[in-house]
Amino acid sequence: MSDEVIWHCLRHNHCSFMAKIETGLFCRNPYNATGICNRSSCPLANSRYATIRDHDGIFYLYMKTAERAHLPNKLWERVKLPRNYEKAMEVIEKHLEHWPKLLVHKIKQRLTKMTQYRIRMRKLQLKVREKIMTVPRKKTQRDLQRLEKAEKAAQLEKSIESELIERLRKGVYGGVIHNVPFSQFDTILDMEKDGLAPELEEEEEGEIEYVEGADIEMGEMEDMEDFEGFDDGDGDDSFDEPFTRKPKRSCSDTMSKIGWKSTKIVAEVEQDEDRNSRLRMRM
């Protein structure tokens, strides 16, 4: 099919690559060299066509000839262009030596424009830019409200603390601190200024202890028995209450009868003290 028939069908019937806007007609085909929809720039309506494409920062020269029109998989010939602008121009002139001058001029313009935007891309990549991130508005307001409440609470606690310290210094509470002595409180206040406030050691209250009374009573009972056997040898009968020696009892009996023996031991101790006092007066 000739190029004129193809262009007539595309221009007057339908073309999926055509984009109509107010300023004109444009082509979205990736092989279009200029991006304009016209007879000379259409890659479908020209059996002999060339363009430049970019693949990951590398430029390639694409060429199409009528000899390969019957082979769609080999329709385009691709040549890699060097990064140097001047060497790339030499490669284009070498491969498009016998091509139409207008098409060669368009290819060179496309190479110049693509080289310029590649340079700008490199500069933008090297330049450090701030990343703009969106923050939910409700979350921001909620955080600000929480911050204000926390600041108010901290100021209130500090004001209460300072007021209590000032009252304690003035003696509003009678000069007596219930938990800590006033002298220690002044010392702590002075050390807080230096940042050396120690921890207060709470005084331990007297603990109630339960002690077994059998050990003590056994020793007292033995002493009492020794006093009962004491005799000065004169056979003095002036004592008001005679004493009789009582037999010793076993430890088990003593332990079992601690309650009723305790009163008896106290009476015996008082009698022994009266006896000792009378002996001293006699001597």
Image (cartoon, rainbow, N blue to C red):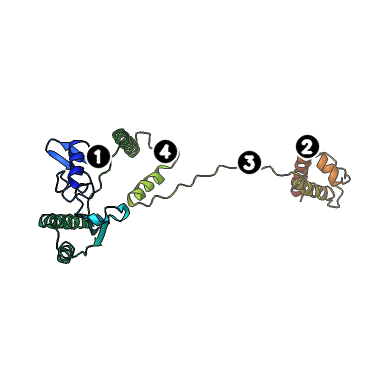
Q: Amino acid at mark 1?
A: Ser
Q: Which residue, given by chain and number where applicable, does mark 2 sit on? A: 259
Q: Which disc is residue 177 wearing? A: 4
Circle nearer the N terminus (1, 4): 1
Q: Amino acid at mark 2?
A: Gly
Q: Which residue, given by chain and number where applicable, does mark 1 sit on? A: 16
Disc 3, SS? loop
Nearer the observer: mark 1 or 2; the answer is 1
Circle nearer the N terminus (4, 3): 4
Q: Does residue 123 sit above or below 182 in this rendering? A: below
- CA distance for labels 1 and 4: 94 Å
Circle nearer the N terminus (1, 2): 1
Q: Position of residue 52 (x, y in %)?
A: 20, 56
Q: Amino acid at mark 3?
A: Ile
Q: Which residue, given by chain and number where applicable, does mark 3 sit on? A: 208
Disc 4, SS? loop
Circle nearer the N terminus (3, 1): 1
Circle nearer the N terminus (2, 4): 4
Q: Tell me if I can see residue 239 in this picture.
A: no
- CA distance for labels 2 and 3: 21 Å
Q: Nearer the viewer, residue 206 or 62?
A: 62
